[in-house]
Amino acid sequence: MDREYLCPTKTTTTCFLKMDVIIESPLRIFNIELGITDINDNAPHFRRDRIELDVSESATPGERFSLPNAVDPDVGINTIKTYRLSVSEHFAIEIQTGSDGTKYVDLVLTNDLDREMRAVHNLVLTAVDGGVPVRSGTANIIVRVQDTNDNAPQFDKPIYEINMTENTPIGTRVIKLNATDIDEGPHADIVYSFTLYTSEKTQDLFSLNPSTGEITVKGNIDYEDVQDKFYEMHIEAKDKAPQPLQGQCKVVVHVTDMNDNHPEISVQSVKNAISENTPVGTVVALVGTSDKDTGENGNVSISIRQPNLPFTLKKSSERPAHYELIVSEPLDREIVAEYDVTLIVTDAGLPALSDNETIVVHLLDINDNEPRFTQSFYTIRVMENNAPGSLLSSLTAFDPDLHENQYLVYFIIEREIANTSMSMLFSINPEDGKLYALKTFDYELEKEFVFHIEARDSGVPPLSSNVTVHIIIVDQNDNTPVIVSPWRAHGSVVEEKIPRSTDKGSLVSKVIAIDGDSVLNSRITYQFLQVTDTTLFSLDQYNGEIRTMRMFSYRDPRLQRLVVVAKDNGEPALSATVTIKLSTVETAVKSYSDMSEVPLEYDIFSDLNLYLVIGLGSVSFLLLITILVTIVLKCQKSKSGIAAPPCRNSVLSERNSTIADSTLVSNDAYWYSLFLAETRKGKLVVRQPAPKGSRYIVSSLPRSTGLTMTSDSAPSTLQVRTTSNNNFCYVMSYNIFW
């Protein structure tokens, strides 16, 4: 049985259990009261096993604090007998008994509290009953000591000394002050500030964070502006109590010098423009140097940045820290017209600082350069038939001088050629050197001109130079080829006769044309323009020989018409044509090659051709006599003039016969053009080379006799000689038999 369950109230210490007992036979009822005796089967316990108390550290000893009491369901001696407190220097307990016998306990402060020494006191309260065996229960008492503002903030040191270089960047931390307050809460929250002993200038340079105590730079610290070379700051730290307490310290910032001032250059005097012939040693400028720093930071040196300039620095003996800029080398404006002389001044600090100053020196020009042409020799090609006044070339000279020393005038140095002044043939613009032709040139008459052109400047005294000009007249294809063989009396139609028995490959005719142009434009080529039968005749395009490609047949017409065109090599090409009418005759003739060195025989003339041959021979003879006489007269006339050049394309005859100049162009042309007709008159023309190849003997033989002369043949001789001159004469020797 559990007494505490059966008798939950503790109003009395006794506990009775009432019952009624009924007995039958006889029926009887008995009232029974069963008394239950308590035993110590319950231990004391506190309603809260953790008791927290806040006690100010300013509480006085004797102050009492009520504690909750413990409970024990047992009764009598088995209930709570007493309380006990754990050992403590500052607290004790007092036990009181209520009217109902309940025991109460109070916590009593016995000594002063100091939160800074011990902020929390942990106590154990024990409740003990009087049973056997003894039972007990405990509760933890936590006493928190509440702070009071009884401690002032304290700095680590009363004086802080710091070294700082000038020009420390703004925002740099100087020091972080750490004042401490052993109080708690608001009593320990500190605010930092400058005291009235800190100057306004110092406060302008440094800032103080009121919460953290960090001092930073907020202005420009200049060593040269600090009188005593240090700054002094007085700092106080206050707590945030209603009646705050405070502590103070002093911060001394010693400023050290650094090389923060650039050296300076001052130009005292300068000559910005000097003549290019200024003598070496001339003073151009006077400069001074300075530096606001002291010691090594204020020691400066000066130099010229470019080591290859014609200037040097010399220290002045009259004024300290001053230098003279002088000319050290000869000057030439045409090489360098302007100099930028950069002076560098450097101090001895670490790191070194420097500054520079540029002095611009202009060189004034003198007339010390003669004009120069772009070429030493000008070769100008001029096409013949040019228009008078046409521009030939621009002969530009260059003078590196300036202004009037550079203005050039061009003119032709006078020279006469064949009583003709160069100024009559050419003209030059005196301002720009453009060369013009004053007349139309003919290549066939004038091949080249050589003269000099001078360029003169306008300096004082003037300087000049000249250049050689070689004018070459370039040939133009302005001469049409002239057909000189076969000879034509009237018009351009030539009538020839040829035996029908002519063999294959026989020479029918030879077309020879000449051209008065130069070599390239005078090269002649030949071709058929019209031909009756293309299978019967061939034409050599280079020498103009017309030969048979086969023998005549009875189907071939008796009359053959050949149109030959002679075309030169010009651009555009010029040409001339000749029409050859060939009539075939029934005459048996043996074929001989006209180029053979052995005689070829022809049959005796037929009666039908006899009169034709006699007529042609007479006309040819008279023509030859006339040509030879003309050539002899021209050659004699040319010999009378010593300075006259050798004759060109002229022929001298030992029998005083002359030939037209235009008929002799080449070794092959001269005898074809003159004596091809002889073969049509019954004679054979044979070319015989003379010794050294300088003379040709051309013989005309009767067709019936070959190389044997008949008794009634009258030979006439025409000699041909060649010379090596560009303008050449021919002397030809012919044996002509009639």
Image: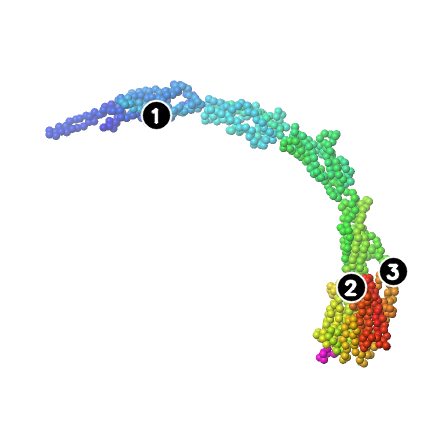
> Disc 2 marks which residue?
517
Residue, x 42% and y 21% (percent of image)? 113
Q: Nearer the viewer, residue 249 or 519?
A: 519
Task: Find residue 80 and report its horizontal and vertical position in percent.
Answer: 29, 22
| Rendered image: mark on residue 593 | none
Quadrant the N terminus occupies: top left
- Marks 3 and 2, how far apart in space? 27 Å
Q: Is the stretch drawn in magenta largely helix, strand or loop?
A: loop
Count residues near mark 3 (Cα–Cα under 10 Å), then give few for <14, some for 14-19, many for 20+: few
Q: Amino acid at mark 3?
A: Ile
> Disc 3 marks which residue?
642
- Is 17 on the left or on the right of 137, as rendered? left
Quadrant hosting residue 368: top right
Mark 2 in CB contact with mark 1 (< 8 angstroms): no
Quadrant hosting residue 91: top left
In the current view of this chain or complex, which residue is farthest to the bottom?
Answer: 607
Q: Nearer the viewer, residue 133 or 224?
A: 133
Is residue 272 shown above or below 559? above
Quadrant hosting residue 435: bottom right
Q: Amino acid at mark 2?
A: Asp
Quadrant the C terminus occupies: bottom right
> Disc 1 marks which residue?
139
Task: Find residue 88 and report its horizontal and vertical position in percent.
Answer: 38, 21
Residue, x 73% and y 77% (percent of image)? 552
Give the magenta range. 552-558
Task: Find residue 474 and report its horizontal and vertical position in percent.
Answer: 77, 60
Q: Amino acid at mark 1?
A: Ala
Q: Mark 1: which secondary structure?
A: strand
**Sequence-wise first label, 1 or 3:** 1
**Sequence-wise first label, 2 or 1:** 1
Mark 3 in CB contact with mark 2 (< 8 angstroms): no
